[in-house]
């Protein structure tokens, strides 16, 4: 209890004197805040990208690709193969038969609204069953495209980020002219970054004959996936790869997420070096200003432990304030900011919103506290190791 009382008394005196060192303390807080703001803002890109890839994807939906393919872009399936896939056990049945859609996936050049530079926007050719396979799709403006017509519908995120996707506009892609007839939402998922049309119109426009690249099917139940997959992989007529929709899109986001996390941590570490040196300077100055006071306390019988704790408490408090300020700044500036970036596995643009989560804010504060600890430990050790006689000479 005696040690605890000493620690509390010295720490309170130390914190009360912060106002006398407001200038240097503010510099340390600003350094911590800058590091945390950049750290959280950069990682919010990866978090927003991850969320848009996962939203709307369901374990009730399966994707079938050519064996050995990692994405739809590198896959290829003939019409007869798509029919075998639709007839497989485990596929849900609707009024018009199997709830499934054989699809094409190409990219088209559409200028970004912000810069005017062309970007690769996904153009997906679908069959009528696509809307039953993905029940999250909802037309919010205009109407669905009509079969056999050069009509497209655009995802809301794509229409927001890229120019020319307004209802009624006409665009030249491939060998055809296309009319935008509707805008759809998809629970803020990756499908909102796409433009959809009739697969049988898209095939001749891009000289794909009767081929497709993937088949999306709605399963009877989550447990039906194993039965569906086993039936297809065991069929000698097929060489296919079967994935759950949610697993497929989670894997699609890994490359960009890992890259952003590596770069974000690298930038934060480089900035943290500067912030930590700033904290060291601040705490060394604080210890130097209070050296005689600390020596007097030790001469009166105060132990070194309470003095060390008081110095560390100041450093950690500055770090906590900086972490809170930096996290709040990142949340105000970055959270909800809408942008688009390249999905390096499909080489197409994905529109999404930066997302600052409580987990990212907590990580930023922990990062700040780590810097505060590193910036305070050496001055704290110096404070208790300086001989009392040397520190009292200035009296």
Image (spheres, grey):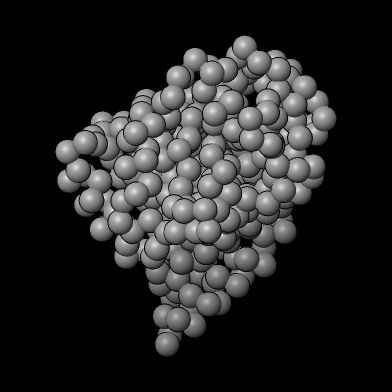
Whether residue 173 appears in this view of the structure is yes
Judge left or right: residue 258 versus residue 340: left
Tell me the residue at 79%/45% (across/down): 141
Q: Nearer the viewer, residue 258 or 10?
A: 258
* Residue 204, x across and y down, in percent: 54, 18
Q: Quadrant of residue 118?
A: top right
Q: Nearer the viewer, residue 54 or 30?
A: 54
* Residue 162, x across and y down, in percent: 71, 28
Judge left or right: residue 298 versus residue 83: right
How many numbered discs sit on the rendered protein?
Answer: 0
In the displayed structure, 23 sits above or below 363; it is above
Judge left or right: residue 149 versus residue 272: right
Judge left or right: residue 167 versus residue 35: right
Tell me the residue at 27%/51% (across/down): 229
Q: Is the C terminus in the top left, top right, bottom left or bottom right quadrant?
A: bottom right
Tell me the residue at 79%/42% (across/down): 142
Q: Nearer the viewer, residue 350 or 156?
A: 156
Whether residue 43 appears in this view of the structure is no
* Residue 170, x across and y down, in percent: 77, 22
In the displayed structure, 337 sits above or below 291; it is above
In the displayed structure, 129 sits above or below 258; it is below
Q: Quadrant of residue 320?
A: bottom right
Quick one: which residue is furthest to the right in this view?
Answer: 168
Quick one: which residue is furthest to the front in this view?
Answer: 96
* Residue 269, x across and y down, in percent: 45, 38
Q: Nearer the viewer, residue 254 or 278?
A: 254
Tell me the residue at 62%/66% (across/down): 15
């Amino acid at each position: 209890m005696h040690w605890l009382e000493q620690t509390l008394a010295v720490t309170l005196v130390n914190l009360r004197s912060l106002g006398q060192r407001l200038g240097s303390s503010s510099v340390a807080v600003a350094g911590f805040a800058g590091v945390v703001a950049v750290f959280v803002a950069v990682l919010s890109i990866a978090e927003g990208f991850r969320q848009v890839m996962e939203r709307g994807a369901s374990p009730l939906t399966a994707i079938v690709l050519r064996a050995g393919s990692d994405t739809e872009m590198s896959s290829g399936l003939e019409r007869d193969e798509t029919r075998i896939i639709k007839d497989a056990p485990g596929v849900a049945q609707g009024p018009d038969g199997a709830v499934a859609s054989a699809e094409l996936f190409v990219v088209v050049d559409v200028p970004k609204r912000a810069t005017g530079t062309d970007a690769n926007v996904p153009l997906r050719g679908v069959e009528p069953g696509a809307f039953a396979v993905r029940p999250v799709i909802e037309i919010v403006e205009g109407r669905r495209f009509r079969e056999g017509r050069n009509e497209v519908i655009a995802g809301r995120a794509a229409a927001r980020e890229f120019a020319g996707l307004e209802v009624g506009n006409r665009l030249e892609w491939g060998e055809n002219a296309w009319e935008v007839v509707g805008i759809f939402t998809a629970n803020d998922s990756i499908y909102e970054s796409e433009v959809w049309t009739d697969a049988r119109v898209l095939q001749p426009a891009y000289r794909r004959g009767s081929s497709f690249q993937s088949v999306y099917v709605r399963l009877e139940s989550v447990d039906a996936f194993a039965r569906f997959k086993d039936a297809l992989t065991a069929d000698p007529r097929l060489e296919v790869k079967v994935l759950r929709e949610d697993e497929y899109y989670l894997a699609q986001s890994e490359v960009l997420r890992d890259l952003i996390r590596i770069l974000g941590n690298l930038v934060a570490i480089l900035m943290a070096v500067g912030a930590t040196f700033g904290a060291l300077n601040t705490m060394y100055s604080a210890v130097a200003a209070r050296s005689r006071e600390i020596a007097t306390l030790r001469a009166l019988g105060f132990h070194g432990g309470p003095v060390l704790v008081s110095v560390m408490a100041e450093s950690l408090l500055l770090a906590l304030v900086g972490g809170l300020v930096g996290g709040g700044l990142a949340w105000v500036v970055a959270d909800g900011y809408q942008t688009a970036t390249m999905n390096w596995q499909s080489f197409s643009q994905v529109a999404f919103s930066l997302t600052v989560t409580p987990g990212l804010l907590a990580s930023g504060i922990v990062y700040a506290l780590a810097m505060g600890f590193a910036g305070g430990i050496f001055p704290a050790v110096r404070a208790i190791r300086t001989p009392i006689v040397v520190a009292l000479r200035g009296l």
